[in-house]
């Protein structure tokens, strides 16, 4: 009995200590969130934008920021940043903007949105100064609209052209005696190539070359226009690998000078009339979002924005996924809300579950009967990401959005040899019908079962084609000719009928307001912000895990890891997903 009470009171004490610590933690978190309202903007402020920080489509709150090493609780989304930069354009307390652009953690579409916002900001006469130690090409794409672009004297500009790389696993699977039983529709549907080929097929090589050249041509043309240079000369510099130092880039006209960061800040100090560089009032976008009301709207009528970012999955999905059931509820909620007069869906997704994509397509089609539905494509809106919204009233894409990929596939691995020969595991069982246990990773599919799966894939592809044909007012044969799993840039998507207009979120919002005949409106955003407890028990767990993985593996390996997880979770399910694991150098 004495031992019982000993352990009982020890456990009780531990529980009490834990509860006390939890209370202090929650109080600290609540205080950090409440402190958002205490940010005050001073005169002669300079907005600080760091491209090295990943930017999500929708703003995120991280209440555990102090515990995870972040210095800011709230991180604005892409459209938040665009609106803030636009607001700062006429904000008398903001003198200019400092762009830190050594690295760039964001995709083509996100960079294009921010670049356009900065270009518009400059039209106010306020300064934009960009600096990076070594500017990547993606960072330079945003930076070249600045008044002045500087690099570290021992740094430079990474000017080597664009490269695209796929990772292939076929030899590894052969050695492991794993047979990837693959079914697909579309000769360009290269999502399964890493498992069935050792190198790119001719079709995939063709589409990849065209895609890459389109992206690169846009990059060069924008740089040439911003810096008043010749496109052919810029291409030649990359082909010859001539920009080996900051001075090389200065002489070529890509940079305005070689400066240390303190020298750049000294230039900013002179523009703001501060006494020392330490007194410059740099304001991050996270802080600026707390200091000004850049989201202010008018009237009682609303436009809903539904942010759809990540892999498309069945069910509710996680915070970084597009859960088909969850997003259907958002669309339905916006449709049934009488105050909401139009819906804008922002998509940044390479696709995923064909069933979830079909269900969201259905919900958007229903919503369109009641009110205007406008779609804005971000970095990627391909395969299922295209499927879900192809029936909207209007589709906007950025010039370098990656879209299309109209095609489907399924993978069912046969791991019988791996289990039996590599680890000594065998399987046996009984069934009431010949196909009751199919599909199973422990044995190969029969010829009949293979025909069934291919028929399912072909049927879903035909449905996909018909959905696009209906939404885009095209013939099924014409959709098939630009489908077959092929990916396109936003610029090309317009010429082949898959997109209506080139533009970003602001353009999509303006179109939605025009269709709904709204002169004044407020914005309602989905997913809606959750309470503190839900953040701590749900999304925060994923945030911490993701950051730990990214820190250990790095950006490229993290992308491979995430893609592998997606393929693993989709075994046996028909997928509408863009080509697997594209890594742009």
Image (tube, rainbow, N blue to C red):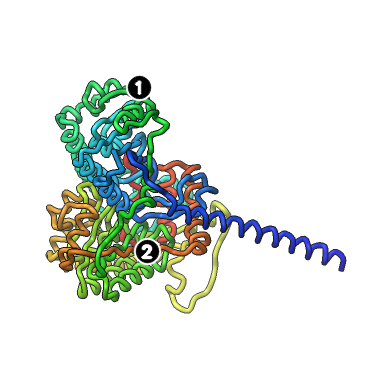
User: Residue 465 falls in which quadrant of the image?
Assistant: bottom left
Q: Position of residue 194 (x, y in %)?
A: 36, 49
Query: Callout 1: helix, strand or loop?
Result: strand
Q: Nearer the viewer, residue 216 or 504?
A: 504
Q: Is residue 521 left or right of residue 540?
A: left
The quadrant of the image that shows the C terminus is top left
Q: Which residue is pictured at 24% across the width and 50% down the height?
A: 401
The quadrant of the image that shows the N terminus is bottom right
Q: Position of residue 48 (x, y in %)?
A: 35, 40
Say few, some or many: other residues with alpha carbon within 10 Å of mark 1 (under 14 / 14 to 19 / 20 or more): some
Q: Which residue is pictured at 48% across the width and 79% down the height?
A: 432
User: Residue 11 falls in which quadrant of the image?
Assistant: bottom right
Q: Which mark is residue 33?
A: none
Q: Nearer the viewer, residue 189 or 95?
A: 95
Residue named by callout 1: 153
Q: Which mark is residue 527?
A: 2
Q: Position of residue 101 (x, y in %)?
A: 34, 36
Q: Is residue 490 left or right of residue 447?
A: left
Furthest residue in direction right, as rendered? 2
Question: Which is more N-terminal, label 1 or label 2?
Answer: 1
Q: Which residue is pictured at 53% across the width and 55% down the height?
A: 29
Say few, some or many: other residues with alpha carbon within 10 Å of mark 2 (under 14 / 14 to 19 / 20 or more): some
Whether residue 457 is visible to the viewer of this picture, yes or no, is yes
Q: Which residue is pictured at 17% across the width and 58% down the height?
A: 498
Query: Callout 2: helix, strand or loop?
Result: loop
């Amino acid at each position: 009995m004495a031992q019982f009470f000993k352990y009982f009171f020890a456990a009780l004490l531990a529980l009490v200590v834990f509860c006390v610590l939890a209370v202090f933690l929650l109080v600290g978190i609540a205080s950090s969130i409440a402190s958002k309202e205490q940010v005050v903007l001073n005169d002669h402020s300079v907005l600080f934008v760091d491209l090295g920080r990943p930017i999500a489509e929708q703003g995120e709150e991280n209440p555990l920021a102090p515990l995870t090493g972040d210095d800011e609780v709230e991180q604005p989304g892409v459209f938040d940043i665009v609106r803030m930069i636009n607001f700062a354009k006429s904000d008398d307390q903001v003198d200019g903007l400092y762009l830190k652009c050594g690295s760039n953690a964001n995709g083509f579409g996100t960079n294009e949105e921010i670049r356009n916002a900065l270009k518009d900001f400059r039209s106010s006469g306020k300064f934009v100064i960009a600096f990076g130690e070594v500017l990547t090409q993606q960072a330079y794409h945003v930076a070249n609209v600045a008044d002045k672009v500087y690099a570290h004297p021992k740094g430079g500009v990474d000017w080597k052209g664009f490269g695209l790389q796929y990772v292939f696993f076929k030899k590894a699977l052969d050695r492991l005696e794993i047979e990837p039983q693959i079914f697909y529709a579309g000769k360009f549907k290269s999502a399964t190539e890493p498992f069935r080929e050792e190198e790119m097929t001719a079709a995939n090589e063709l589409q990849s070359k065209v895609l890459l050249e389109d992206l690169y041509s846009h990059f060069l043309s924008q740089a040439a226009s911003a810096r008043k240079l010749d496109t052919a000369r810029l291409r030649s510099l990359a082909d010859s690998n001539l920009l080996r130092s900051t001075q090389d880039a200065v002489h070529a006209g890509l940079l305005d000078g070689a400066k240390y960061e303190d020298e750049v800040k000294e230039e900013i100090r002179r523009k703001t009339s501060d006494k020392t560089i330490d007194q410059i009032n740099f304001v991050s976008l996270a802080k600026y979002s707390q200091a000004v009301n850049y989201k202010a709207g008018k009237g009682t009528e609303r436009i809903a924005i539904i942010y759809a970012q990540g892999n498309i999955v069945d069910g509710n999905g996680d915070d970084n996924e597009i859960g088909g059931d969850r997003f259907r509820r958002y669309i339905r909620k916006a449709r049934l809300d009488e105050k909401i007069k139009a819906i804008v869906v922002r998509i940044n997704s390479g696709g995923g579950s064909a069933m979830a994509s079909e269900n969201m397509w259905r919900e958007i089609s229903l919503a369109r009967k009641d009110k205007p539905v406008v779609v804005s494509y971000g970095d990627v809106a391909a395969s299922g990401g295209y499927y879900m919204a192809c029936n909207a009233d209007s589709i906007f894409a950025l010039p370098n959005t990656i879209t299309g990929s109209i095609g489907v596939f399924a993978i069912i691995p046969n791991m019988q040899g791996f289990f039996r020969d590599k680890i000594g595991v065998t399987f046996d069982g009984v069934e009431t019908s010949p196909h009751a246990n199919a599909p199973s990773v422990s044995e190969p599919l029969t010829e009949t079962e293979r025909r069934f799966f291919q028929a399912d894939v072909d049927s879903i592809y035909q449905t996909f084609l018909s959905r696009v044909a209906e939404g885009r007012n095209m013939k099924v044969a014409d959709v098939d000719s630009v489908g077959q799993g092929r990916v396109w840039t936003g610029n090309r998507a317009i010429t082949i009928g898959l997109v209506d207009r080139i533009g970003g979120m602001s353009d999509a919002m303006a179109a939605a307001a025009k269709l709904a005949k709204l002169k004044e409106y407020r914005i309602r955003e989905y997913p809606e912000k959750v309470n503190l407890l839900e953040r701590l028990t749900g999304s925060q767990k994923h945030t911490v895990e993701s950051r730990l993985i990214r820190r250990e593996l790095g950006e490229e390996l993290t992308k491979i890891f995430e893609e592998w997880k997606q393929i693993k979770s989709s075994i046996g399910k028909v997928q509408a997903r863009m080509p697997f694991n594209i890594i742009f150098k």
